Image (cartoon, rainbow, N blue to C red):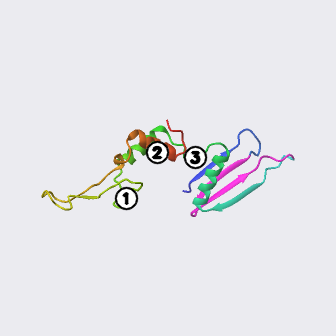
Amino acid sequence: MDKQYGYTVPGADYPAYFNAILRGGQVVLTVRGPKQDDGSCGTTSEIALPPSVAIEIAIGIRDVAGEPSGWLALTEAQIKQMVDRFLQWKLPDGFRPDAGISFEPRYNVDNVHGWPEGKHEPSGTNLFDATQALAMVRHMLGLPVA
């Protein structure tokens, strides 16, 4: 079954509507204008777009309508889950901070004290605490930092 989203302007004969459906790997957008002065149905247009282009258009529409970055419409619980997941995330092997921050992925390399060599495996909590991570996620989403 195809994924689909539709919206019809309420309260009119031949109302304006918008429909988006994922069909054959393309997002097909259909738009119909409101009823014409002569009582006829409004003009209907259809276009098929790659999903990435459709997403950019949706973001742009939300921005123009006054909801910058609000297209994600995440709940506070979802934002908290993002923060928690980030703090649990094991940083990649190629983690190499800059701006004067030093990080040595291996320790006891010289084995001076007879201890075995080891590897640091930092996670998001090595970068930020929960309050800082929340501020980062809210910033990424274009939301006010609480």
Q: Are marks 3 and 2 in contact (CB under 8 Å)?
A: no
Tell me which amino acid carries mark 3.
Ser
Which label number is shown at residue 96? 1
Q: Which of the 4 quarters of the picture holds residue 68?
A: top right
Residue occupying image coordinates x 56% and y 54%: 3
Q: Are marks 1 and 3 in contact (CB under 8 Å)?
A: no
Cα–Cα gap, marks 2 and 1: 19 Å
Q: Which of the 4 quarters of the picture holds residue 131?
A: top left
Where is mark 2, residue-wise?
136
Residue 94 point in image, percent of width and height: 36, 61
Taking depth in this image into account, of 94 and 67 the one nearest to the observer is 94
Residue at the limit of the structure toward the left, as seen here: 114
Taking depth in this image into account, of 36 and 145 the one nearest to the observer is 145
Cα–Cα gap, marks 3 and 2: 14 Å
Residue occupying image coordinates x 77% and y 43%: 13
Say which label, 2 or 1, has the lower sequence index.
Answer: 1
Say which label, 1 or 3, has the lower sequence index.
Answer: 3
Where is mark 3, residue-wise?
69
